[in-house]
Image (cartoon, rainbow, N blue to C red):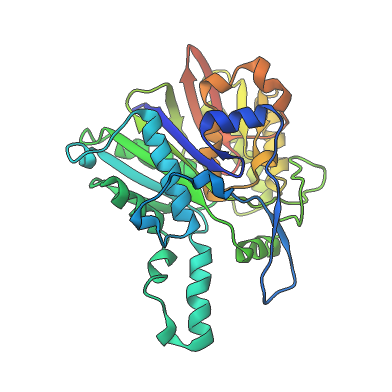
Amino acid sequence: MSLAIAGMGWVTPLGTGVDSVWQRLLQGEEASATTISEQFADRVYSVFRVPESALKGISHPRLRRASAISRFAAAAGLHALESAGLKLESQNAERIALIFAISNGGVSYTKRFYHEIVGTGAQAASPLLFPETVFNAPASHLAAILGVTGATYTLVGDGAVGLAAIKMAEELMANEALDYCLVVGTEEIDWLLCDAYRRWRLLRMAPPIEPFSKQNRGMILSEGAGAIVLARDGFVTIECAHPGGHFRRRAEAEKILERILCDLGQVEIDFVVSSANGTFVDQAESQALQEIVPNALVYTITPALGEGVGAAGLWRIILWRPKHCIRKRCRPFFTWTTASGYGFHSRGRRFQARDARSF
């Protein structure tokens, strides 16, 4: 069964609004890095934050004490529904499913919650903070705001979790009791995350992000959210949602990528939206693309927006919006990187994409 994208919304370090952010990208703009520190450590990290102005107009009692990750998700989800022209009411609230893609969750409130416990004892545990520490907190907030009574799920994974959420949406939409599925990927920044990714040797201390550099210097973390409304009709048809693959050793990554590219290559692949971010996966992506689709045009958004992890998969799909993918407009941005795990068909032309990290 094929699905279609009926609406999109995103919150990024360059602001909100699919068209407005795209225009800023066309003008060559990149998000400005800020620094983040912690009182109990000396290290300072660079990050790409969502500007406060991006969330203006998004207000609801549920979000008054909510963490940033929940507010980003609510804004992106509401924008996507508005873009689709979909208004939820009691009559159709049970006919829409909600799927959230999460990587790191609400780290900021989780850190605050346990910091108080460690500092003053278990009696200091905050009943206001605890609900924000669970991975499904953003989904709970948005479902309550919208009045969704249908299925609600939260998937936890790596940077490809947004694409896994689309695969799950495809399976859910096989049920004729559903008309729509809102898929949201979201992420927030905290010093603790930066320190963890540094220890995993995936982070660099300051911009720029250099995809497919000879030396893998790492990525810069960012935050925000992306959301798409899936339906049976829309302006983009998703022809294939690949389940991806797994590897135990880095040397296996290239072969897995080649296999997935071959699976998606039933038609000519001529445009690839990249997930390259300056880490070890870049070399495997580059080699796989050169082997399977050497003539494809490739574009990466990571140097401009940073690595959004849980939000990144949805960002890349939103970036692909058909009216954006006119070659004469996109060519200045193309670099040799790879993409996300999905195929699309629109306006009589076929494009395929796959996520370098959908394994």
Q: How many marks?
A: 0
Name which residue lies at 53% across and 65% down: 108
Is any part of residue 174 visible from this angle? yes
Name which residue lies at 61% across and 40% down: 14
Is any part of residue 295 visible from this angle? no
* Residue 236 spot, x, y in % from top left: 44, 23
Please state if 249 lies on the left or on the right of 117 as rendered: right
* Residue 347 spot, x, y in % from top left: 48, 13
Q: Residue furthest top?
A: 348
Q: Quadrant of residue 133?
A: bottom left
* Residue 146 spot, x, y in % from top left: 30, 45
Name which residue lies at 48% across and 61% down: 106
* Residue 273 spot, x, y in % from top left: 61, 31
Q: Nearer the viewer, residue 190 or 128?
A: 128
Q: Quadrant of the C terminus?
A: top right
Q: Residue furthest left?
A: 91
Please state if 102 lies on the left or on the right of 306 as rendered: left
Q: Quadrant of the N terminus?
A: top left
From this view, report whether residue 79 is shown above or below residue 23.
below
Q: Nearer the viewer, residue 95 or 261?
A: 95
From this view, report whether residue 92 is shown above or below residue 251.
above
Q: Nearer the viewer, residue 134 or 23?
A: 23
